Amino acid sequence: MKLTHSQISEILSNYTSSSEGFVTLQSLIMNSLMYHEREL
């Protein structure tokens, strides 16, 4: 699935509109980084 720049911006905007969403976004990013690190 390929997203356009505006679609990505909209998703990030929705997550960062509240502090709880921002924490969720941080968690998703960290989990993704740790997953890829384990794959190496």
Image (spheres, grey):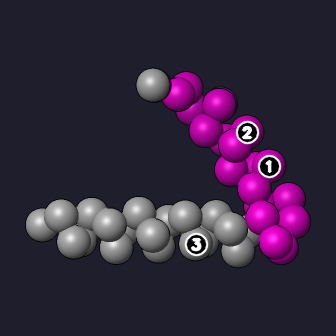
The residue wearing badge 1 is: 14
Q: Name the secondary structure under disc 3.
A: helix
Name the kind of residue labelled 1 in the image: Asn
Q: Secondary structure at mark 2?
A: helix
Q: Which residue appears at 80% of the width and 49% of the height?
A: 14
Q: Earlier in the sequence, mark 3 or mark 2?
A: 2
Above or below, 9 against 1 in this view is below
Identify residue for label 2: 10
Badges 1 and 2: C-beta atoms under 8 Å apart?
Answer: yes
Residue 11 rendering spot, x and y as whole percentages: 70, 43
Question: Label 2 amino acid?
Answer: Glu
Name which residue lies at 34% across and 73% down: 34
Q: Position of residue 18 (x, y in %)?
A: 87, 66
Left or right: 20 as drawn, with respect to 33: right
* Rendered residue at 47%/73% (across/down): 30
Residue 12 x, y percent position in the rendering: 68, 50
Give the magenta-colored segment's residue range. Answer: 2-21
Type of amino acid at the residue the image marks with label 3: Ser
Foreground residue among 23 and 8:
23
Q: Which residue is mark 3?
A: 27
User: Which mark is on residue 31?
Assistant: none
Q: CA distance from mark 1 to mark 3?
A: 15 Å
- What is the distance, in whole Å, between disc 1 and disc 2 at their CAs? 6 Å
Q: Is residue 10 above or below residue 27?
A: above
- Quadrant holding the N terminus: top left
